[in-house]
Image (cartoon, rainbow, N blue to C red):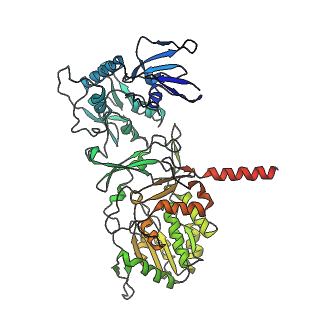
Amino acid sequence: MPVVIVDGKEVEIGANERLNGIQVARRVGAEVPHYCWHPGLSVVASCRMCLVECGQKDAATGKIAMQPRLVPACQTPAKDGTVFVTNSQKVIDARAMVEEDLLLRHPVDCPICDKAGECSLQDYHFEHGRESRRADIQPFTSRRRDLGDTVTLFVDRCVMCTRCVRFTREISGTSELMVINRGAHEEIDVFRYENGEIHFPLENKLSGNVCDLCPVGALGDKDFLYKQRVWFMKSHDNVCAGCSTGCSIKVEENQDHVYRLKPRENPHINTWWMCDEGRYDWKHVHDPNRLLELRRKSTTSSNGDYSNLDWHLLPAELDKSLKAAGKLGVVLSPHLTVEEAYLLAKYVRGLDPNAVVAMGPIPVEGKDEKFKNGFVIHSEKCPNRRGVEAVAAYFAGKLISWEDFLNDQAASLGGVWISGGYKSAWHTDADAAKLAGVKTLVVHDCFASPLWNAATFQLPGGTFAEREGSYVNYQDRLQSFRWAIRAPAGVKVEGQLFWQLTGGSGLFRAKQVLADVSREIGYFSAAMGDIPEVGVDLKVNQLAAAGQQLAGAAT
């Protein structure tokens, strides 16, 4: 195995690994500062913050020959016998000079900069900069200009790392950004007319990623600008519910209010990126039109009045009403988690062993959009079709679609439970009319709809940020997550209610339910045990079983 020496420590790397000086230094706990290098982009070695000493150890004699000059660690491959020194006085002085140079032209406007608290320039100045400033502080112009609908540029803050330019060329493939002028006058910009108006704006569907990539706050996200200081927010690992890609994300909130979503690294799904559709499409979480009252249709009034109901009285009311309704049916939304779908189907089947179990409508918009680096925004706008389909098929024996349920099953049912959770209209008045004969109609949803208005029980439900459980994306990769914010007053998130209805004690425990699901349903068997941050591939066991069958057939 190749052996690399970092700061006097030997570290083995894989024979086929392609690491640079920054990556191999991390193996021994040494963090090499950098601005322009990013593992998802090409290497340009322009910022010079990652300068290190480098040499080569002679395998025969054991002697080490060091290069006379410092080299950028991002551009230097780690090979057998390569020697890196990341903490010598020569390296420390070089980093201090780079920091000093950058701060000559960078405004010290941290009190109003959105990046303050997560800014590499700020952090590196304290870790690697000089103790005192040797230049006079000149007033800065704080020039700002728009690059598109979602991103704004604070020109003076830019350190010309060009991560954003490379992103639009190598990842989105749209090339809106470029470097104008030369030398000390270099600036990032988009293509403009002579009068300064934007001719070719930054408006690709991955454009929000350039704000994440910017290490110093030069690129600001207009949606987040001046909304919150980053040190006030808490960050929670979660999964994007915008489409079936299921990007790994972080939900960042303060006092149960979501302020932004950011991508979380997952090499199996989204690497370091997420689309703008998922990034900004969370406003329904705090929509003033969300349903917040648990209500039941009056059994005495002739005009269909509703009265409020307490959550602790609901289980008994539901049991009584559904048992008296006759044959039951349940519609599982693709917005439910695996655990929620399983508990709901289990509850309804507990009341009626022959209850119909069907899938809710699958929202589809347009066609899949694929970008230069392979990132895909799927047209299927729900996070868990695969997982809920597997649960529905387990209970029903076959998959019953929403259309088949309405046309072939609804008329024969006395009680129906419908779970929603969609962000926009997902059924019509005509669909609701097909369930007009149902004696007990339970609708669990976030926003009013024709079915909600016809329901016997109106149950306000939770959004993705308030849920806990697991989603299965289009690749059959299961990811588990915990809730990021508490649901608004009046709402009981689906998992908590279903846990109570199925006899669970204490608080809802998604991990325990997933263990039950993994034992009972073969499709989920790979999810037994702890789920890593990057999720588990549910196809692993299926492929192994298929291989064993083929081997058995061959013998």
Left or right of residue 398, residue 553 in this image: right
Residue nearest the viewer, comparing 247 with 350? 350
Residue closer to the observer: 57 or 173: 57
From the image, which quarter does the N terminus lie in? Answer: top right
Q: Position of residue 68 (x, y in %)?
A: 42, 10
> What residue sits 51% from the left and 12% below the top?
63
Residue 293, image x, y percentages: 34, 72
Foreground residue among 410 and 462:
462
The quarter holding residue 147 reads: top left
Left of 235 or right of it: where is 136?
A: left
Picture quadrant where residue 230 is located: top left
Judge whether residue 104 can be spotted in this image: yes
Count every numbered label the image shows and give the total.
0
| Residue at position x 56%, y 55% in the image | 527
Quadrant in which residue 117 is drawn: top left
Question: Does 321 sit above or below residue 85?
Answer: below
Q: Is residue 72 left or right of residue 115?
A: right
Q: In the drawing, does residue 93 fall left or right of residue 22?
A: left
Q: Is residue 334 visible?
A: no
Q: Position of residue 210 (x, y in %)?
A: 38, 37
The x and y percentages for residue 50 are 39, 24
Image height check: is 424 above or below 183?
Answer: below
